[in-house]
């Protein structure tokens, strides 16, 4: 990647609706090269229609629960875009019954495969190439800690997603590749949020996630890694560096920050 951020090449999952659609439209407007992935072909077509005349935008209909499909998606991105500089793991399936034992086996498998395994596997396949080029971004869309602890299997799968970010950030230190998490900061008017029963007037718009994503995708966020960004806390009236600082904290949980790598290595 050179100094012009808009030449970066992005693989974005879950681009057919909600946060993914908002992110796709915003990145396309800034000239990023995009491969937009989703299992919903009609949703991807709608996203493309909102982008207008995409000069550097490709789409891929895929099922992220399938390992062969994940590998094929990365290969397509490498071929269509010429490489991947930014991986945005936005795709998710979710919800959860009132009691954890009421979830079906299929619900559990889908949440873990799409929300947990897929982001990790896509990062595993793309991060080494980013590191070789000396620059890259891994951005995972997660959820609030309260949701992680209250909803199963969705919450647990998103908790795994953020735990992976902490490990990725540690392992990628010094490579020029960063790994960060973003969450909306409340119930948003996405397909999942609209099932919550809340009034749309009390929901966050999907576009709330765009400002922190654009900042993380740029050179302005170089060396910022292992962080959790709360999109609803982003203050557009502040200079972007100050807005980023005010809207973020360490990824993971309080105990995460207390455990150093040295302490982990000393454990039997």
Image (cartoon, rainbow, N blue to C red):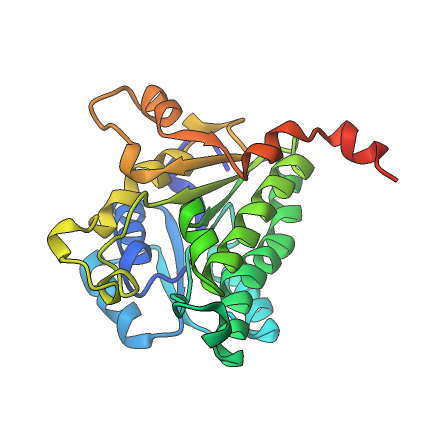
x and y, in percent, of residue 57 in the image: 34, 58
Q: Residue at x 78, y 28 (%)?
A: 262
Q: Nearer the viewer, residue 220 or 121?
A: 121
x and y, in percent, of residue 251 in the image: 52, 37
Which quadrant of the figure has residue 30?
top left
User: Is 247 left, or right, of 132 in this rendering?
Assistant: left
x and y, in percent, of residue 7 in the image: 41, 42
* In the rendered image, the vertical position of residue 215 relative to residue 68, given as above or below: above
* In the rendered image, the vertical position of residue 61 relative to residue 149, given as above or below: below
* In the rendered image, the vertical position of residue 70 relative to residue 217, given as above or below: below
Q: Residue at x 29, y 46 (%)?
A: 186
x and y, in percent, of residue 255 in the image: 61, 34
User: Is 21 left, or right, of 7 in this rendering?
Assistant: left
Q: Residue at x 36, y 41 (%)?
A: 213
Q: Nearer the viewer, residue 164 or 266?
A: 266
Q: Nearer the viewer, residue 120 or 264?
A: 264
Q: Residue at x 57, y 53 (%)?
A: 160
Q: Nearer the viewer, residue 94 or 222?
A: 94
């Amino acid at each position: 990647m050179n100094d012009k951020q808009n030449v970066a090449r992005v693989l974005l999952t879950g681009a057919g609706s909600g946060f993914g659609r908002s992110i796709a439209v915003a990145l396309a407007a800034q000239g990023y090269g995009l491969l937009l992935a989703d299992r919903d072909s009609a949703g991807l077509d709608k996203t493309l229609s909102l982008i207008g005349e995409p000069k550097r935008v490709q789409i891929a209909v895929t099922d992220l629960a399938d390992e062969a499909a994940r590998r094929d998606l990365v290969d397509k991105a490498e071929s269509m875009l010429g490489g991947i500089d930014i991986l945005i793991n936005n795709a998710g399936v979710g919800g959860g019954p009132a009691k954890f034992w009421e979830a079906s086996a299929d619900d559990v498998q889908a949440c873990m495969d799409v929300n947990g395994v897929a982001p990790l596997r896509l990062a595993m396949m793309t991060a080494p190439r980013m590191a070789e080029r000396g620059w890259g971004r891994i951005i995972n869309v997660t959820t609030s800690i309260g949701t992680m602890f209250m909803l199963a299997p969705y919450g647990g799968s998103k908790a795994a997603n953020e735990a992976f970010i902490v490990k990725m950030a540690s392992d990628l230190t010094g490579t020029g590749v960063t790994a960060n998490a973003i969450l909306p900061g409340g119930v948003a008017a996405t397909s999942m949020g609209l099932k919550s029963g809340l009034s749309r007037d009390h929901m966050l718009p999907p576009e709330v996630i765009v400002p922190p994503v654009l900042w993380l995708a740029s050179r302005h966020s170089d060396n910022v890694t292992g962080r959790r960004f709360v999109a609803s806390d982003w203050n557009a009236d502040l200079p972007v560096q100050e807005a980023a600082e005010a809207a973020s904290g360490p990824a993971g949980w309080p105990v995460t920050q207390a455990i150093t790598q040295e302490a982990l290595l000393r454990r039997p």
